[in-house]
Amino acid sequence: MKTDLPKLKKYVLEREMRKRGGRYVESLRLAHNPKMTQRELAEKLGVPFYTYISMVEMGATYVPPDKMADWAEALGVDLQEFESKYMPRASTDNVVVPISFSSETKGANSNSGGNVLEDAYPEYMREALLGVVRKIMHLVSTIERHPEMDAGENILYVMFDPRHPKVKFPANLIEQYHDEVTITLQQGIPRAEADYEWWHSLTVDDDCFHVTLFFDGVETPISVPWESILCFADKTAQFGLGMGSFDTDDFPDQCDIIPLFPSDNDRIH
């Protein structure tokens, strides 16, 4: 697969900025006495799920520019200071502004913002979870190739970031879905009874999975890199993995979405 190196470099730089910005947010939250939990911060912001805070702090998503004033107030800092130290995106001229951390902004956790092992855990955990998704998708592709297998009914949801440079997805659909695309793969359900349009030709490799979907009745082959996946859920098994910011309305209530780094060892339903 040919890779657009400038786009990939920009994507990697933006991801690193989100991670640094996330550590800054975490340092502000932990600096409160007593320490503010992710759930408490979510309540202050009016965010329905505290896992969104977790996603921001680990760099899986970012604070929207129009919400920075709310975040600054909730974290107890001046808006100008927050904006100057939290830079989640590259500027319009593609110049990436690095984020610096002083000893005053590290809060109660002295390792926040620089410990090599601490920074490695989120990435390694994400790789491990994506390995689970890859194996499940490989199993689904095997079942598709062998219809004689009695695998029962399965309904899978995959949410991914269509802006990832390695994603192969129609440009007109990216404009329609913007930051998040959710596809549904129903298996073992007669086409006439399926809730969503059909799919076929699912293949899996080390970098991504490929599948042909129907959008408005038109066959559309797409390719989704594993690293672009934000959330994966299996409605039948009532299980899911959250690896980025996502709208839970796109997923069934029956699924327990387990965030990458949950707070209070809890789940969302």
Image: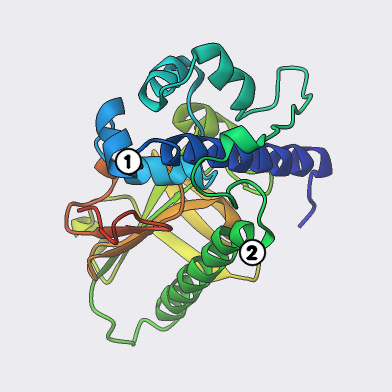
Residue 63, image x, y percentages: 48, 28
**Residue 7 left/right relative to 267:** right
Asked which secondary structure carries label 2, the reply is helix
The residue at the point 60 percent across, 52 percent down is 111
Residue 101, image x, y percentages: 67, 35
**Residue 115 left/right relative to 60:** right
The residue at the point 54 percent across, 21 percent down is 82
Figure check: 132 above or below 180: below
The residue at the point 27 percent across, 49 percent down is 251
Observer able to see residue 246? no
Looking at the image, which is closer to me, 240 or 60? 60
Q: Nearer the viewer, mark 2 or mark 1?
A: 1
User: Which quadrant holds the N terminus?
Assistant: bottom right
Residue 166, image x, y percentages: 68, 49
Figure check: 66 above or below 216: above
Looking at the image, which is closer to me, 239 or 98? 98
The crowd level at tag 1 (other Cα within 10 Å; few <14, some 14-19, many 20+) is: few
Residue 149, image x, y percentages: 33, 87
The residue at the point 39 percent across, 18 percent down is 73
For label 1, the residue is: 34
- Going from N to C along the chain, the mark reached first, 2 or 1, is 1
For label 2, the residue is: 117
The crowd level at tag 2 (other Cα within 10 Å; few <14, some 14-19, many 20+) is: few
Going by the numbered disc 1, the residue's amino acid type is: Pro
Going by the numbered disc 2, the residue's amino acid type is: Leu
- Quarter where residue 50 is shown: top left
Asked which secondary structure carries label 1, the reply is loop
Q: How many marks?
A: 2
- Quarter where residue 199 is shown: bottom left
Circle number at residue 210 = none
